[in-house]
């Protein structure tokens, strides 16, 4: 079994998607400054250099701002678990919709054959 994922870009994309979900759920708990920096980094794929120019700080300052904000989001999720609950509900909804589609397809096949 390999120690690294077979597709590293897929692993990065999954992590970014998870962090975007945390930002959606807990973003209002961050300061406006932190929220905007995270949004630009995650949603707009800005570099730390671009963030530093926008926020008037050093590149390491921009990195620290995003790192601390993301750590805060992780802390909120660890304590509250709202994002995990939303993900669980999304899975249940998707399963129910798939079952409903299956029943509708079976019903239309049965009425068409009769």
Image: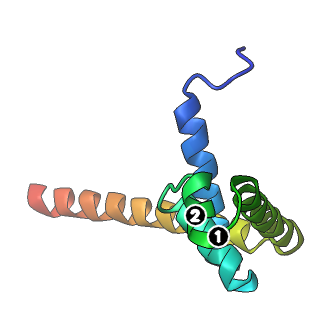
Q: CA distance from mark 1 to mark 2?
A: 5 Å
Place residue 107 in its image quadrant: bottom left
**Residue 98: image location, x then y, percent:** 41, 59
**Residue 101: image location, x then y, percent:** 33, 62
| Residue 53's disc number | 2
Q: Which residue is mark 1?
A: 56
Disc 2 packing (10 Å; few <14; some 14–19; many ≥20):
few
Place residue 25 in its image quadrant: bottom right
Residue nearest the viewer, comparing 29 with 98: 29
Q: Residue at x 64, y 26 (%)?
A: 5
**Residue 14: image location, x then y, percent:** 58, 47
User: With respect to residue 22, does 48 lie above or below?
Assistant: above
Disc 1 packing (10 Å; few <14; some 14–19; many ≥20):
few
Q: Residue at x 59, y 41 (%)?
A: 12
Classify mark 2: helix, strand or loop: helix
**Residue 79: image location, x then y, percent:** 89, 72
Instruction: Find out whether the residues at labels 1 and 2 contact each other: C-beta distance under 8 Å.
Output: yes
User: With respect to residue 67, does 26 lie above or below?
Assistant: below
Q: Residue at x 66, y 84 (%)?
A: 32
**Quadrant showing the N terminus:** top right
User: With respect to residue 69, does 14 lie above or below?
Assistant: above
Place residue 102 in its image quadrant: bottom left
Q: Would you say 65 lies left or right of 96 here? A: right
Q: Residue furthest right?
A: 79
Q: Is residue 40 visible?
A: yes
Classify mark 1: helix, strand or loop: loop
Q: Residue at x 60, y 38 (%)?
A: 11
Q: Residue furthest top?
A: 1
């Amino acid at each position: 079994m390999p120690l690294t994922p077979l597709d590293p870009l897929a692993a990065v994309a999954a992590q970014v998607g998870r962090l975007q979900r945390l930002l959606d759920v807990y973003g209002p708990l961050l300061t406006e400054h932190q929220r905007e920096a995270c949004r630009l980094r995650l949603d707009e794929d800005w570099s730390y250099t671009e963030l530093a120019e926008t926020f008037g700080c050093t590149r390491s300052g921009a990195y620290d701002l995003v790192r601390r904000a993301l750590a805060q989001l992780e802390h909120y999720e660890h304590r509250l678990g709202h994002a995990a609950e939303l993900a669980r509900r999304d899975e249940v909804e998707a399963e129910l919709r798939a079952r409903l589609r299956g029943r509708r397809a079976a019903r239309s096949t049965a009425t068409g054959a009769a």
